[in-house]
Image: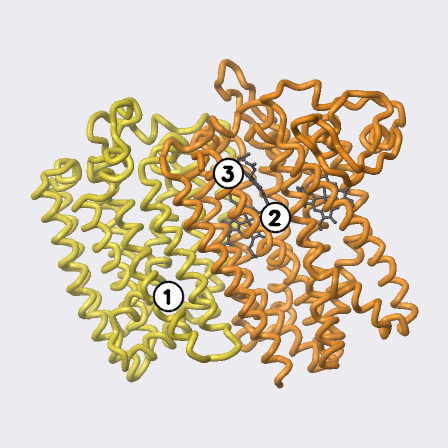
Amino acid sequence: MEIIVLFFLFFSAFAYALLGGADYGVGVLEFFSANKNRRISKFAAYRIISPVWEANHIWLILIIVIMWICFPIYYNLIVTQLHIPISLVLIGIIGRGTAFVFRHYDAYKDRSQKLYDSIFEISSVFTPFMIGVVFGALLSGNMIHPEQIEDKTFFDLYIATWLNPFSIATGLFTVSLFAYVAASFLFVETKDHEKEYFKKKHKTTTIAVILAGLLLFGVSSYENNAFAKIALNSWSMVVWLFMVTALIYFGNKYSHNKNLFKLILAIQVLVIFIAWAIPVFPNFIIFKNGILSMLENISPDPVINSMGWALIVASIFVLPGLYHLFKTFGLLSK
Amino acid sequence: MEELMAARMQMATSMVFHIVFAAIGMVMPFFMVVSHYKYLKTKDEKYLELTKLWQKGVAIFFVVGAVSGTMLSFELGLLWPEFMKHAGPIIGMPFSLEGTAFFVEAIALGFYLYGWKKIKNKKFHWFTGLIVGISGVASGILVVSANGWMNAPSGFDYINGEFININPLEALLNDAWFSQALHMTLAAFVAVGFSVGGLHMYQYKRHGKLIHKKAYEIALIFGVIAAILIPISGDLAAKDIAKRQPTKLAAMEAHYETEKGADLIIGGIVDEKTKEVKYAIRIPGALSFLAFGDFDAQVKGLDQFPEDEIPPVAITHYSFQIMVGIGTFLMLLGMIYLVSIRKPQWRENKLFILLFVLATPLGFIALEAGWFVTELGRQPWIINGIMKTEDALTPVEGMQYSFYLYLLIYIGLSVTVFWLMNRQIKKLNEL
Ligand code: HDD
Ligand code: HEM
Ligand code: HEM
């Protein structure tokens, strides 16, 4: 059952990065588009994304629930030491979600639209950035092992853990990755002048992801931080190089076949996940000193078993529903 | 402000905010599908128009409910990490099932909102709307079960400060879940039924559009039936508490001294220092009767418990009085409404309309008051009898800034949502 629970945890994280990511990315693209193109961005995105909008964000809730039920010690560490950036993520989520519906459902389309737009765009960039920061913080090697918190200051415990170059670089990478996912997605989903537009975006974001990825590695090896020591060995570099090449090559080659293109896109995101997860497994938090294995700090068996079953039963209900939802609204073509 | 106080206030603010949207998210879909059903049956365009109007409301409220709920699920950990560390694995079951219910709800809502043209099978489209409502209620019941566990912890053995032999299913089916879930579900229908009903009745009076009449008829029938049932389930809850949480009962009733044949205290001003209630109406023996079904039963007063295990009495007592007062009023109003179905001339009466318009916010006030009773009455425990709230608090300092920030956000959002709804109605009346 441990395996099942872990599988669902990673699957949710992956699904959030892909589907939630596309969703945030749309806002990122809008933020970075020139005024005259903003409408294209806005309307294409709305048409395509909104039916699945809600469902995309529940993955995050699933991640949290699995964490707190099955890995309470890890969860406890994360929510205390990363209290501040997580709160910032929440504020971003609130701003973005509400601005998104308000701008669509407001009965009058007047000046307030401008305000909704800016809140939506700013929080679309800010939220994934902070999510990346949180993620980066776990691996940057600045987290404090629970046995060593005694003599630490507020700054060591609650600021330095996340306010460091590596976390920030991860934040930037996340934003670019999400923008890339969105641009690729919209590129195959649109037609005519919209397609032209997103094709350009697809190109620029491809470059952005690569640059951000390089920056991430650069910072990591310059600092020679924990992540660099563990993950930047030769084989993961091979994976990364493979990914980058595949990303550019296949993306362009198969852009006429929507489903294949999306599959490749999903694989790209998956590869990034694997490249990150395998080397650090099973210590998903890297501490300044000391180790705390995620698997050895798992909840007792009855909890894991019931959670595992709950997840299996839940997916029987949820996955077919999701599949049909995507299909009905043309996000998976027949 | 001290850290604990700030964290408690932040929790309270978030909950008070979320519950409004949660209640609407649970109930509005039912109104919507009834209206939709009537449209499919009668082909009366007015019902279609109404369905679409309510659908917009559901969409707006759903999203605000979803984001505020997402915040809450983080806040539980951010504010009370020690609580979550131990309670998480035990009460995880309702939360993971709730997650499933949300998923189903979000998928169904996607189908419903955007499926008007895309879904060929009209019945199936309608059915997805119904699923939205059912899964909303299911998720409500599940979270309330988690809250019930905080009141009546079960499904584990607590030995030397360790939680062992965890049984998630037993924790889910704790002693409090049923009475609380039933009462909460009814409360949601009361609150939303009367507020939507009152609102449309007012609009009907002012603008005379038939759509408003149809709207209030649908909303009120739900509200009215729930309002007539809710005192019964409230009594059930109170009897439960009498057995399980005597401190809470004593605080609710401002009952300081243990006695047989205890009086029911109605109204009054509580003085926590002198432990007296002034200017109250007292009904002899009634408290004993309500709590234990026997006029002579002994009811434990607050004097039976150590000082540091007593919840804040005054607020709990006032909140309880407010809830019960409103409950009684709405029950009577509900009966009047049922009679008015037979005597339509009553509905022309100014006083009749005025009463329903006045009732618009009352259900929600009772709902919030009831939660204050439950949550404040449990203090100082976060897990009744097991863990104190202060021991669950996060070690992160500066919680007051966090509280002010959240407060600002919630106020901003409330104002915006209110303003948006106003604009919806204004637009409708311009058409
Ligand atoms: C429209 C809202 C509403 C109305 C009219 C009432 N209640 Fe209520 N009550 C709630 C809304 C509510 C609530 C907000 O939903 C609570 C908070 C926790 C819960 O499960 O339900 C609650 C809690 C609650 C509790 C505490 C439960 C606990 O802590 O476990 C008691 C004893 C009562 N109620 C009793 C009553 C009685 C005797 C009523 C008679 C008229 C009544 N309520 C009307
Ligand atoms: C939505 C309706 C609810 C409202 C209005 C509400 C209200 C409140 C209030 C006023 C407090 C502060 C009490 C105090 O510290 O003095 C509080 C605390 C808390 N509530 Fe709720 N509550 C609600 C539902 C829930 C549910 C369903 C859960 C759990 C699943 C929950 C969990 C908590 C926790 C963990 C605390 C903090 C610890 C404590 O103060 O005891 N609440 N809530
Ligand atoms: C009595 C208390 C509560 C009730 C009745 C309730 C009910 C609901 C309902 C019906 C929804 C669906 C949203 C909508 O349709 O508007 C919702 C959303 C949500 N609630 Fe609550 N809730 C309560 C308290 C809580 C607590 C304590 C938490 C945190 C642990 C929480 C977490 C969530 C989350 C994460 C969502 C968003 C899910 C989504 O995206 O659909 N809720 N709640």
- Number of other residues with Cα within 10 Å of mark 1, as a class: few under 14, some 14 to 19, many 20 or more: many
Residue furthest bottom in the image: B431
Q: SS for tag 1?
A: helix
Please tell me which residue is depicted at 41% across the width and 68% down the height of the picture.
A49
Q: Quadrant of the C terminus of chain A?
A: bottom left
Please tell me which residue is depicted at 36% across the width and 74% down the height of the picture.
A42
Question: In this figure, which residue is indicated by the disc labeled 3?
Answer: B8
* Three-letter residue code for mark 1: Phe
Question: In this figure, which residue is indicated by the disc labeled 1?
Answer: A120
Marks 1, 2 in one chain:
no
Q: SS for tag 2?
A: helix
Please tell me which residue is depicted at 28% across the width and 84% down the height of the picture.
A193
Residue furthest right in the image: B343
The nearer-to-camera label among 2 and 3 is 3
* Three-letter residue code for mark 3: Arg
Question: In this figure, which residue is indicated by the disc labeled 2?
Answer: B140
- Residue B224 badge: none
- Supply the letter of whichever chain is yellow: A
Q: Is residue A232 left or right of residue B82?
A: left
Whole-number angstrom distance, CA of label 2 to CA of label 3: 22 Å
